[in-house]
Amino acid sequence: MASIQSNVSIAFILSFLSLCFSLSGQNYKKADSIAALHFGRDLHNLSLLAVDLTKDLSNDKEKFRALYSWVCHNIEVDHLQFKRIEKSRYRLRFDSLKLNEYDRVQGPLTIIKLHQTKRTVCTGYAYLLASMAEIIGIECKIINGYARTANSEDRSSDFPNHSWNAVKLDGKWQLCDPTWSSGYSYVQGSLAYFETDYNEGYFLCPPKYFALNHIPQNPKWLLDTSLNKSYNQDGPLVYGAAFKHQIFPDSGEKMIRECARRDSIYFNFQSLKKLESQDFYILISNGFNSREIELRNLASSENSLRFNHVFEKSGIYDVHILANTDVLASYTLTVYKP
C-alpha cells in the first residue's frame, strides 16, 4: 500500500485550501484539501489512490476535482521528453501512416515512464486523469487535437500536438486540461526545470473559451454547436493568464490587424467574473525595442472591457495585452501611413 508523504508542508496544504471555487461557483474546498493530504503518493496502486481521493466526497464533480487537483500537483512535465517527441512527430507530419505507427509505439512507453517517475507529457496527464476517473465510475475521454501557442511550429489544426480531457458530469460533457493547469517548464540549455503553478482556469472551462487555444481533431469535442474547427484560429494568441484571470478576447477579435497612423484601434475582452482591480497594460514591440503603457481610459462594465490605443508611427508591431504583469493575449499590428 502506498503511504502518504509525511512532510507535506502547512503552506502547501493552505495553498490548496485557498482554491475553493470553480468558474460555476462550486465549492471545492473539501476536494482540494483531500488532494493536498495525499500529496506525494506514488502510482503503483492507481485504483487505491483514486478511491482514497474520492471516498469521502458526495458527488461526481467534487470527486473529479479531487483527482484533477492531485494530478496537477503531483505530476510534472518532462520537457526533454516533450521536445524529443515533438521533434520526431514533426518530421512525420506529412506521412500519416508513419505518424500513427510512431504514436502507437510511443504511447505505452510514455505511460510506463509516467508510472515510474511521475513525469510525463500531455498524453500522460490526459491518460492518468481519464484512468483514475474511470476507476471510480466517471466517464472521461482523452481528446487529441491542436493547441495554439506562440511556439507551435505547425499552424494547421489537422496536425495534432496536444491532448486534454472531456469528462461527463451531471449528464453533461465538460472540458479540462490538466497539463496546462499544472505549471511551467523553465529551460536553460540542455536543462529543464518544472515549477508547479496551478491554473484553475482550465478546469471545466466553458467550451467557447477553451476553444480559443484548443482545437480537437474531432469537432464534436468542441462541445458547442455554434463553434467549428476554424473557430478563432485566426484570433489572437491566448495565454494561460487569460484562463487564470478569466478574461478573454472577444470571439470576433483577429490576431493580425491593421490601422492608419494616429487612428484609434480598439481591443475588446470579456470576463467570466466581475472585473476586479487589475491594472491593465499594453506592451508594444517593433523587434528592436519595446515599451509598456498603462491603459487608463478603459471602458468597462461588470463583464466586459474595451480600450483603444493610438499609434503615432507606422510600422509592424507585436502587441501584448497584460493584466497586472500577466500577458493575456497577443496581436500583430500593421500601422500604415494614411
Image (cartoon, helix red, strand yellow):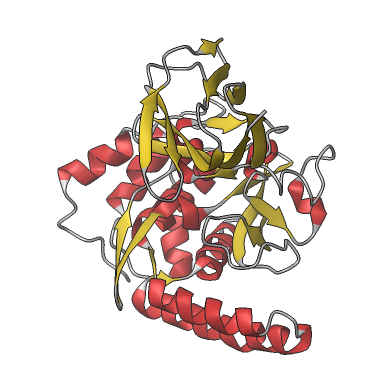
Q: Quadrant of the N terminus?
A: bottom left
Residue at (51%, 70%) from the top-left corner? Answer: 124
Tell whether 214 sits left or right of 181. right
Could you tell me which residue is drawn at 70 percent across and 79 percent down?
Answer: 93
* x then y, percent, for residue 26: 52, 28
Identity of the residue drawn at 36% across and 32% down = 292
Does residue 172 appear left or right of residue 8 in this picture? right
Q: Using the image as rendered, state which of residue 235 and residue 215 is in the foreground.
A: 235
Q: Quadrant of the C terminus?
A: top right
Q: Quadrant of residue 189?
A: bottom left
Q: Mark yes or no: residue 55 visible.
A: no
Q: Nearer the viewer, residue 73 or 278?
A: 278
On the picture, is 69 further left or further right than 89?
left
Q: Position of residue 80 (x, y in %)?
A: 39, 77
Q: For this rendering, which residue is in front, 328 or 146?
A: 328
Relative to 155, say whether 26 is above or below: above
Farthest residue in the front direction? 337
Q: Image quarter for residue 293? A: top left
57 in relation to 129, above or below: above
Question: Considering depth in this image, is 52 or 185 the residue closer to the camera?
Answer: 185
